[in-house]
Amino acid sequence: MKNLIKDNEGFVSLVDALLSILILFMVLMAFNMVTDIEIPSLSEENNDFKTSQDIMEIMSSNLDGRDHSILESISYILSINNNSISSKREVKLILDDFFSRYLLDDEMNYPYAFTETNQLDGEVLSSNGDYLSADRVNVAIRNYGNYSYKLIFILIHSFSNT
């Protein structure tokens, strides 16, 4: 057996160098593995939240050359008719038309519920889908005059790291 204390051939130096290279290689591999881990961003997970907020923002904006926003129009119709059944039907037609343009497409049918919570005690004015049994929903709220509108947007998919 060789005497490692009196090594004149450089065996200990060679082993020391190989161990340091091995340790350096393992550190680089660990760093590379950590940087490849996919971490979902908050913007991906809040996409549906942004969608519900965006839809409600469109409803409160004057777009497409309209004189009044959707929320302003339906608030006027409800208030001028003292929240009558006929005014609720007219509001439902306006809302159904709006939501069919923004939430329905050939591939996906996005479930939602649009309610008024202040004057009509949470009455659903327009809906598409069963929002009561949904396990994940996002809510957007806007006020106009004495009316407080709530858009309940039902999450139909979850994000995964695939």
Image: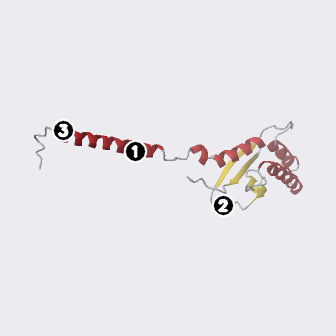
- Say few, some or many: other residues with alpha carbon within 10 Å of mark 3 (under 14 / 14 to 19 / 20 or more): few
Q: Residue furthest bottom?
A: 133
Give the percent coordinates (x, y) of residue 149. Answer: 74, 48
**Residue 144 higher or lower than 158, as above or below:** above
Q: CA distance from mark 1 to mark 2?
A: 44 Å
**Residue 89 higher or lower than 7, as above or below:** below
Quick one: 105 or 148, which is closer to the camera? 105
Report the mark closest to the observer, 1 or 2: 1
Residues under numbered marks 1 and 3 in contact, where contact means CB atoms less than 8 Å apart:
no
Point out which mark residue 134 bears: 2
Residue type at numbered disc 1: Met
Label whose residue precedes the other's in the sequence (3 or 2): 3
- Could you say which quadrant of the image residue 21 lies in? top left
Q: CA distance from mark 1 to mark 3?
A: 29 Å
Quick one: 75 or 38, which is closer to the camera? 38
- Give the labeled residue for mark 3: 10
- Give the labeled residue for mark 1: 29
Q: Left of 48 or right of it: where is 92?
A: right
Residue at position x 48%, y 45% from top? 36
Report the mark closest to the observer, 3 or 2: 3
Report the mark closest to the observer, 1 or 3: 3
Residue at position x 13%, y 37% from top? 8
Q: Secondary structure at mark 3?
A: loop
Number of marks in the rendered image: 3
- Could you say which quadrant of the image residue 23 lies in? top left
Q: Secondary structure at mark 2?
A: loop
Residues under numbered marks 1 and 2 in contact, where contact means CB atoms less than 8 Å apart:
no
Residue type at numbered disc 3: Gly
